[in-house]
Image (cartoon, grey):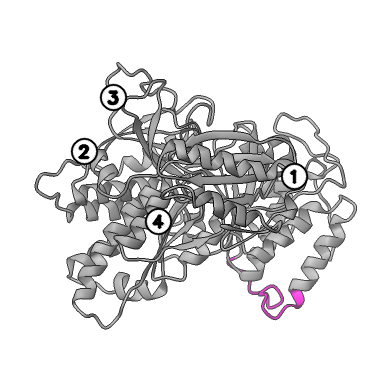
Amino acid sequence: MANLEFPPQYTRAGNTTHTGEVHSIPQDEQFAYGTAGFRFRAEKLPFIVYRCAYLASLRARQLDSAIGVMITASHNPAQDNGVKLVDPSGDMLSSQWEIYATEVINASDADLPKVIRDFEKNFQRSSQSKIARGLIHNAKVVCGIDTRVSGPHLMEAARAGAALFNVKFVDIGVVSTPMLHYSVKSFNEPEFADPTHQGYYDAISGAFKKLYEMTQEPDGSRYQPELIVDCANGVGAPRFRELLKQIPKEMLSVELRNENGELNHGCGADFVKIAQKMPANFNLTPDAAPEPKCASFDGDADRILYFRAKNGCQGGTAELFDGDRIAVLFATYIKEQLDIYTSSKPRNSLKMGIVQTAYANGSSTRFIREHLKIEPIIVPTGVKHLHEAASEFDIGVYFEANGHGTIVFSKHFDSVVRRNASPLVHLRRLHLFSRVINETVGDAFADLLATEIVLRHFGWSMDDWNQKLYQDVPNVQIKVPVADRSIFKTTNAEQTLVKPDGLQKRIDEEVAKYKDSRAFIRPSGTENIVRVYAEADTLENTHRLGKSLEQPFAHFGPTSHPIFPSFFGDSR
């Protein structure tokens, strides 16, 4: 192996920002690849992106496949940026390769050549790697960026990283994160879609239009096809505008707002979720004409929330239709089709599962269990846990309360529904609905179109959507600073505290005092705090329960700092 030479601007010592300034990174500073990859202030990213792109090129050669590199910091402020890698099927990077990514990024400049040589040698010897057999004709690194000013510079860092071992680099430009995931899957599975912007637009809009044409609104329908979308001043604006060109306005009329201002500032799904306020450039005064149906994307358009002004509230308070409510809406529609299918006693059965975290509103969980007759699967916080659990079903629905979620479909579903041109209406609906959905990852564009189709199918207004499923129970979250979060251990998908001893008993005693109540306490994954989550039948009782659960932590650290009480949980 020839001597490895690294461009100085992409080393720790010479790490050079998009403004041309050298922002050196200490040789011993350590980083960890998380659910969002690596995400920091943009000035830290050049050397990280370069090394991640090298690792993507190694993964691409190992599998002889396209591997994705997405440069985004999602809902973070405009001055941040980040990078994450995408596996061949459009899924998040495998857990083992997250460890490899952490090892490569954490190497000092002096140690990096040896770290890379060792990786190269190990994969050349591996019988499971295609590198040794020279079967790397399809290997490529596919890279996209969002609208941040640091993006183009980091794209060049990625290009240089892929070039270290001469792996083909495909720049797909400014895209939403879901578009990058979709493109990677399309490069590796050409029958899925054309791996271009237009291929993505055509596939999703085409399925939407066909499903629209066969969806008859019921008598007395109150569905309205008008919608205002808060684009978070991010990539959702230009890319969704292009997608909407494929859809006639009589099918869906969309007004885009927050297109060109400061990214995620006072707008976007994360702002609406946390502040529970109308975003910038939406009517905030109670005497103004109410906005019609509204939705909000986050900065990279992988989350969506619906919202409207909350009746009787001052200061632009928003009523949220969050990820829980979207998931239940989708599941209700799918179950209707599956019930018709099952009634015909088919040879091949199809099983649907619904996956939530402990932060899902308790009313949504009860509705799924009692009305849909499905036992929801509860998993620890994090999209990877949700996606993996959903993949165990033929149709796996998962959403976090923050609006990130999708539906995944099994190979069995593919053979029974997608590859079988059935004349039966319910199977055609399932087929087309599965093509509107971006099954690789949560996708604000696809989830919006799917939501509109289902609301039209049921003939529902926002009032109907709110009233005909379930009513959220009040909940509150409290952050409690502690000296050492590592002493707190949980089980049962983070719902039961097993260490320190005795605290779970105290939680159970407090919960028993209130009707329709539940609570759990879990340590943060990133900072020395524990998070208290509490629900009860009234907002007043919810506050009391939450406050009572702060007290056991008094001797573990400083006093607590409560965050917004709400009717909608957030798992951040």
Mark 2 Cα within 10 Å, few/some/many (few <14, many 20+)? Answer: some
What amino acid type is highlighted by mark number 2? Gln
Q: Nearer the viewer, residue 5 or 314?
A: 314
- Name the side, left or right, on which 8 lies relative to 392: right
**Disc with the residue nearer the chain's start (2 vs 3):** 2
Q: Nearer the viewer, residue 28 or 207?
A: 28
For mark 2, give the secondary structure: loop
Residue 448: image quadrant is top left
Res 493 label: none
- Magenta-colored span: 124-138
Q: Nearer the viewer, mark 2 or mark 3?
A: 3
- Name the side, left or right, on which 102 lies relative to 384: right
Q: Nearer the viewer, residue 51 or 275?
A: 275
Residue wearing tag 1: 556
Res 290 label: 3
* Residues at marks 3 and 4 touching, judged by CB atoms closer than 8 Å: no
**Disc with the residue nearer the chain's start (4 vs 1):** 4
For mark 3, give the secondary structure: loop
Structural distance between the alpha carbons of marks 3 and 4: 31 Å
Residue wearing tag 2: 224
Give the percent coordinates (x, y) of residue 247. 27, 43
**Disc with the residue nearer the chain's start (3 vs 4):** 3
The outermost residue toward the bottom is 347
Q: Nearer the viewer, mark 2 or mark 1?
A: 1
What amino acid type is highlighted by mark number 1? Phe
- Name the side, left or right, on which 482 lies relative to 440: right
Structural distance between the alpha carbons of marks 3 and 1: 47 Å
Residue shown at the point (54%, 49%) measured from the top left: 510
